[in-house]
Amino acid sequence: MTRRGRLDVRVVSVLGALLAATLAALVASVALGEFSSPPLGVVATLAGAGDRATNFIVLDLRLPRALTGLLAGAALGIAGAVFQDVTRNPLAAPDVLGVAGGASLAAVALIVFGSGSAVSVPLVALAGALTAGTALYVFAWRRGVHGYRIVLVGIGLSVFAQAGIAYVLAKGRIFEVAQAYVWMVGSLNGRGWAQVWPLVAALVVLVPVLYALGRRADVLALGDDVARALGLGVERTRLLMLGLAVGLTGIAVAAAGPIGFVAFVAPHISRRLARVRTAQGLLALSAATGSVLVLLADLVGRLAFSPHEIPVGIVTSILAAPYFLFLLRRGTA
Amino acid sequence: MLLAFSVVASLAIGSIQVPFGEVVAAFTAYDGSDAHAIVRDLRVPRTELGLLVGAALGAAGALMQGATRNALAEPGILGINAGAAFAVVIAIDVLGVGSVAGYAAFALVGAGATAAAVLALGATGRGAGAVSLALAGAVLTWLLVSLTSAVLVFDAQTLDEFRQWVIGSIAGRDAGVALSVLPLIAAGLVIALGAGRSLNALALGDDVARSLGQRVGRARLLATVGFVLLAGGAVAAAGPIAFVGLAVPHIARMFTGPDYRWVIPYSVVLGAVLLLAGDVLGRVVARPADLGVGIVTGLLGAPFFIWLVRRRKLVAL
Amino acid sequence: MNLEARGLSVGYGEADVIDGFDLVVPTARMTAIVGANGCGKSTLLRALARLLKPRRGTVLLDGRDISELPSKEVARRLGLLPQSPVAPEGLTVEDLAARGRYPHQGLFKGWSAEDEAAVEAALAATHMTDQRGRALDELSGGQHQRAWIAMALAQQTELLLLDEPTTFLDLAHQVDVLDLLDGLVHERGRTVVMVLHDINQACRYADQLVAMRDGRVHSAGAPSDIVDVAFIADVFGLDAQVVEDPVTGTPLCLPLSQPRRTRCTS
């Protein structure tokens, strides 16, 4: 975003618009729902002086849920941006490359075969994501990690995870299987403060590091040879950044399940909105885009067929498809 | 040779071991015993189906990899599996269909409709014909998968039935299923075996192929039709089976080189062998239960694929 | 600033592409590496730039083994421009030049006045100052190369290594880039080593020519000293006449054609 002290006007203004949209979506998420709370009541609650009913709905239910969505969306958006930037491949993203698949496999196995609880499932999911990420890096490594190989290995891992998941789903009892299926799709249902805090912690720790590495990512984008000639430790930087991205993905998936395609689509949308020239700019925009996407998807999921609630992961997947259709018609991928 | 061996293995092995001699006897001197009954009534149709489906998948993969010049092309690429799955889910949920034959019929319709939609979409997009097709396929796959999930999340009963089908398996299908997809797969195989020359030309790039007198659009269309027949037939009969269509042409190429006139026949045979082998493995490993062949290929196919990817000098897609 | 290769052997996989290579790069001069395809020119350049690890032998930078120096230090002294470099969409000339400052920046050091000055100087030296805001993909071939050279210049290294900087450019742009590099050497005292596939260009511009054949040095020296008919035959496998270039006085290679009757075999 900053270049020689001058801010890139377009990127900043788009970021501002996205942040405003995020805020609006957040407010809407808190105010709207099955029981519509009058706006004044919401404000009163936020100021600490609302009535008990509104307090409960806003503070215990909607606000933490919306925040979970916002933070998970940001984390996924950033993870996707890092993957695509570092591998120089627009097709790369943790949800496509099996990281989310690994998390799902672990979580689903626990839910169906073990006794999953609100604490153990996220932990297991995180472990699954980290394992898959490690496998991805190790298998793709061959004197370095290059763009296409990592995509191909990721596809292989993803299919492996899918097969495992199909097996688990087929073997378990339908009750647990149905539960596992809902988790697997990505949902914000029942997410509360217990999910928010770990997300906050992760973002606060990991994101600044990634941001600081932005300059290195910019050099990396010039090609391995040039980057090395400029003195960059190419493999080290890639490993570090990918590792952080996998961590972010793991925590987001642990909190809300693998919300489909947010990580994949957010960087693409960001690049369309503004001609982003630096890694830091892309990170910021993707985070905001991811947040907006998830919040909007959740709103739609909650309100469109009220009182039935469509899990947010389904809404994002359904929305992602037409976007790519649009890309197809424009002739670029 | 390998083929014969796998056929025999398929007939002989299972939750009840039938010695080779008995297998032969079941055909030559049928005596109504349990063992013979198992061989003839259960395992023969299963083996037949396995041969058919495996051959279809192998040929389908080879056709698509040639037509799109994409080494990653595989039966799922045109959204066929996703379309079939969605159709099956709708059949179960909305229409209450419960039989394997019913699934097969709907799966076929779903596969065909999706392929048609993808072709229509792919043709309207700008950009290279091959890339557009894959992208359109990906788009439709996502859409259908999410719609499928949408239904399944709300209807646990449908999920209960669907999850068995979606594994991909040649068990529990009687001879009728094999017979019903036979004409489709046969037609597809005919197209595939005849497509060798045109695929060789396509492999050189559209421009070069045209200058060699190859009708590029037509060749690709024909290949796609053949592909739909084969992959559609396969998924209708056995559900979505991962990796066979993807890996088999690569293995075939290791023996035959890039000449599609050889790759395709080899893929047909290898596909059948691999599928039967996977099925047998599924029976052996999880005795007395039966791991569907789709799971075996998914779990084993992935490491193989990764090994493949590591081994070759990668070319850009 | 001294760059030297001693007994260098480099290879990919099983075979050695370069074997037992000795070379001293003369300071403040332009050195051109020539040879037939596949003789190891790019490999040599990459080994000199520390992108490839040698199997035997060493590359010495100012007398020290280059593989033992910290990468940023090497990057402050030696810059590389590979063949057909890639850049992300939308990158402007300025942005690219700015990234050349990386070896001089630390994790917490922001953008300094020094960096600013270096970029300005680089843009001025390559005559790209008025193109600074344009995106790389909009530039012509020659401008594109000059933008990358500006990046290497912003790096402020004494040594500049270029791998076939003129391939894929049309004649006017080729001359443009080579003249620029010539100016860098003779007016600003930099040392340039470049791989060239055009022997006549190499003769025109290089102070020192290094000819490679089968991974070894065939000969090295000033063009007018070493380039003759035997040289062309040995290094390129070509029958040619060598005359004096009427414009610059350097050797000019004129390939001899086969008489038309004997060209196609049946």
Image (cartoon, grey):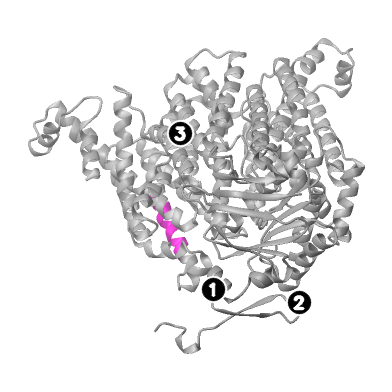
Amino acid at pointer 1:
Ala
Q: Main secondary structure of the magenta part?
A: helix
Amino acid at pointer 2:
Thr
Asked if C262 appears above or below A84 in the picture, the reply is below
Residue B76 inside the magenta-drawn segment:
no
Residue C227 placement, left or right of A109:
right
Residue that extends furthest to the front in the rendered view of this protein: C225
Q: Are marks 2 and 3 in contact (CB under 8 Å)?
A: no
Task: Indicate which disc, 1 or 2, sits on the residue closer to the N terminus.
Answer: 1
* Mark closer to the observer (3, 1): 1
Q: CA distance from mark 3 to mark 1?
A: 78 Å
Residue identifier under label 1? C233
Whether residue B156 can be seen here: yes
Residue identifier under label 3? B92
The quadrant where residue A248 appears: top right
Residue B98 placement, left or right of C21:
left
Amino acid at pointer 3:
Ile
Residue A323 placement, left or right of C216:
right
- The secondary structure type at the circle numbered 3 is helix
Residue identifier under label 2? C248
